[in-house]
Amino acid sequence: MGRLIVVSNRTPSPRERTQPAGGLTVGLRDAVRGVDSMWFGWSGNQVDDVKGQKVDKDTVDGVTYATIDMTPAQYEGFYQNFSNGLLWPLCHYRMGMLSFRRADWDAYLEVNRMFAEHLTPLLRPDDVIWVHDYHLFPLGQMLRDAGVMCRIGFFLHIPFPPWSVSRALPIADELLHEMTAYDLVGVQTEEDAINLDGCFAACGVQVKARAFAIGIDPDGFLEQAETAVKSHDGRTLRESLHGRKLILGVDRLDYSKGLPERMLGYAQLLKRYPEHLGKVTFLQIAPVSRGGVATYQQLRQQLEELVGRINGEYASYEWTPIRYLTSPVARTTLAGFHRIADVGLVTPLRDGMNLVAKEYVAAQDPKDPGSLVLSHFAGAAPELPDALLVNPYDADDTADALHLALTMPLPERKRRWHGMRDEVWKHTAATWARDFLEALHALPSPHDREPEHRVKHR
Ligand SMILES: O=P(O)(O)OC[C@H]1O[C@H](O[C@H]2O[C@H](CO)[C@@H](O)[C@H](O)[C@H]2O)[C@H](O)[C@@H](O)[C@@H]1O
Ligand SMILES: O=c1ccn([C@@H]2O[C@H](COP(=O)(O)OP(=O)(O)O)[C@@H](O)[C@H]2O)c(=O)[nH]1
């Protein structure tokens, strides 16, 4: 059997302890462990000249990380503007935030072409290629154009909206047609599969999407949590609480995560259930993400104002209701924080999956598990019906769920946690990758594909 070639814009820095926050590399890293594989993507570096650049290779624990650089102009047009200023809000149902420019589309295609040019010579005929996420929709077609005949699968980590929304994308039809180059297209949830299939049908594209929910390595995360509660950081956090209950939120600072709405929900808790005043601490870890994109800068400002206002209104001289951090925290440390937390608060307005919700479940102490408050709009929600499910747009709903979570008797917490625990251990990062790759292998070889399915790229 050939190698697994993973391709994604973001690659992990295999030798660094603190990684940039983000679930794609977390889930995939757990999935490629121990597999003969190469992970190809962006190095994270911007350089002025990429002409004639060499692919940088580093092999760690059997995985070869092969990376290339981008120019600042490519980073801006491909990553900031087209991927994160257009595709991201569109796929998260935020039509009012779209900004389309043809120059960004050109930069997007240019970077995809650059990926294809540098990846093609590294490939062997029996390799299986697995392309990830919205940054690389056209890559499969570009690899086909370069003569690559390997099996190629594609997985979308973020939601996909129905045609009534996605048709706002001026190049939607072209992007969807290019996906015929993939042998298998995977998404996180059944809802995303139905939406994407509706878009394919609307454009006359002969592709069917299938749902494969990503997970984590729960055994590994639990082990980290058990170690981390006893570490310096774990002990310090616990001592700093002075016996108060802890609500924990962990999210990239992204408007899809519903952070202002979450703050308002917590403020409602303090207002409507004053018995919690001085008895609870909300720790929100929100590392800055995509800080060069204007909408993300505005969100940061909005949150700083909100946190300041809520703390100003409810704090006492010896208690601060919200602790708010915008620097990343190592995942190993976070595991301990999850275990200490009485409540995991995960309230995205839309989220592909949300691995944090699964990490919270995995980290709990079976003898005294905490409660998970989870948005209906996280991809994880259909898998975790035992969470306290909320509509994040309704601050009172969040406040009620928080109150319930903070006061829930132990038997009820245990019952709910066992249901969630079974799910998190059943659908892991490893089963996700295995299921996807088995489905890809089960399909007819690309050598037998109908020639009319091959669309020449412009
Ligand atoms: O690479 P960045 O621009 O810094 O962003 C980080 C990642 O964010 C997104 O993650 C998604 O994947 C998770 C795992 O499947 C999923 O749980 C989450 O709901 C998604 O938002 C993005 O899709 C990745 O490409 C980024 O690397
Ligand atoms: O300071 C932080 C914040 C988050 N994370 C990790 O980043 C991932 C976030 O993944 P998720 O699927 O929840 O959302 P995404 O950021 O990919 O949209 C999780 O594994 C978190 O533990 C981290 O390591 N440090």
Image (cartoon, rainbow, N blue to C red):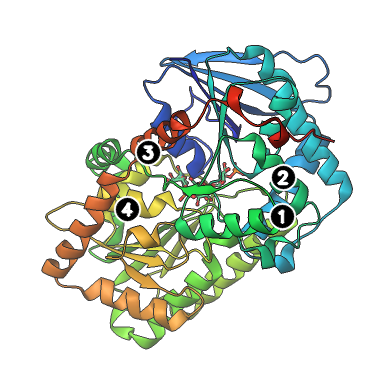
Q: State the CA–CA distance, disc 1 to disc 3.
A: 32 Å
Residue 104: x and y in percent read 83, 45
Q: State the CA–CA distance, disc 4 to disc 3.
A: 15 Å
Amino acid type, mark 1: Cys
Q: Could one spot residue 356 in this view of the protein?
A: yes
Which residue is label 4 attached to? 360
Counting other residues with Cα less than 10 Å from the Cα at mark 4, is it few (<14), some (14-19), or many (20 or more)? Answer: many
Pointer 2 and pointer 1: residues touching (CB < 8 Å)? yes
Which residue is label 2 attached to? 177
Query: Residue at the spot x=71%, y=60% of the render?
Result: 295
| Mark 1 vs 3, N-terminal side | 1
Residue 332: x and y in percent read 36, 38
| Mark 4 vs 2, N-terminal side | 2
Q: Picture quarter containing residue 249? A: bottom left
Q: Is residue 239 above or below residue 404?
A: above
Which residue is label 3 attached to? 429
Residue 265: x and y in percent read 45, 76
**In which quadrant will I find the C terminus?**
top right
